[in-house]
Image (spheres, rainbow, N blue to C red):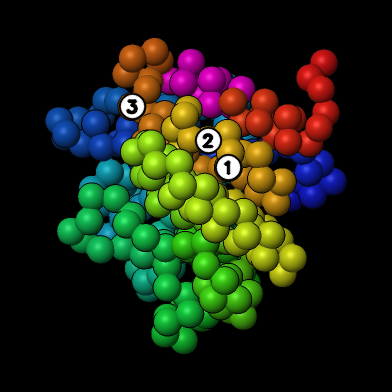
Amino acid sequence: MANINENTRYLRLGVNIDHVATIRNARGCAHPDPVRAAHMAVKAGADGITAHLREDRRHISDRDIERLNSEISTPLNLEMAATEEMLAIALEHVPHASCLVPERRQELTTEGGLDVAGASPGLASVVDRLRSAGIRVSLFIDPDAIQIKAAQAIGADIVELHTGAYCEVALEGDAKKTATELDRIAEAAQQAAAGNLEVHAGHGLTFDTVSPVAALPQIVELNIGHFLIGEAIFGGLDSSIRRMRSLMDKARTAASGVQSA
């Protein structure tokens, strides 16, 4: 996940391996191993690995983070709530990046973006302490102008735009709402990039919804997890990642106006 502004055509893929751990934890045993999945993801074309250490440890464990950070040479993106406990863990392991996300115990998955504009001053302190340790800081936000300005104001390096609303209406087949949500993402990506924020995106992306987002030139990284792990049940993890990688590359190439070799 290193900066690659010199090559704006390339779009990085971060693979989230949380739900390999979810399956493992269903039996309370050691299999399947999320670290093994991370190694496989990198071989299949992932540019980075994302893992969300939740406060309730429902999937990824502290030991998983320790192993991922020491055994995977590809950059690790640690998703975390902006709490003192998670800050201490991040400062201990010093991953390549930390993505701050909202977290509620009762939610099945992250349901929306972080309210940076309405956050307490403590959020700015967490951002500052992470950056002081050499950790790149990403804020997972809705594609909203106010949130982007707030992310700039507290010194974030990156914003990850929440694509969940777009994916929901796209899968429902509502063309008008899909276009509206895609426009929101495109406008937010333009605003963030103009404000010197690196732009990532993710949440809910599938083979059917990834291409329009991948075509947006300001976005330099997509983070995808649940869908890829689900597809791996039917065709294997290698196959699901390679297909996603191919769709991303084709969309970016087509958008740039450059013909494939």
Under mark 3, the amino acid is Gly
Q: Return the x and y of residue 57 as percentages of the image width and height.
A: 25, 51
Q: Residue at x 39, y 42 (%)?
A: 174
- What's the magenta bit mostly, secondary-structure-wise? helix
Image spot of residue 93 (x, y percent): 50, 55
Picture layout, residue 41 above or below residue 150: above
Judging depth in this view, the residue of 107 and 168 nearest the camera is 168
Q: Which residues are magenta?
A: 237-246
Compute the Cα span from label 2 to label 1: 6 Å
| Number of other residues with Cα within 10 Å of mark 3, as a class: few under 14, some 14 to 19, many 20 or more | some
Name the secondary structure under disc 3: helix
* Mark 1 vs 3, N-terminal side: 1
In the rendering, which numbered label is found on residue 150? none
Q: Which residue is mark 1?
A: 213
Q: Quadrant of the N terminus?
A: top right
2 or 3: tag closer to the N-terminus: 2
Question: Residue 196's quadrant in the figure?
Answer: bottom right
- Above or below — where is 173 with respect to 136? above
The residue carrying mark 3 is 230
Secondary structure at badge 2 equals helix
Badge 1 marks a residue whose secondary structure is: helix
Q: Nearer the viewer, residue 64 or 116?
A: 116
Which three-letter amino acid code belongs to the residue tagged 2? Answer: Val
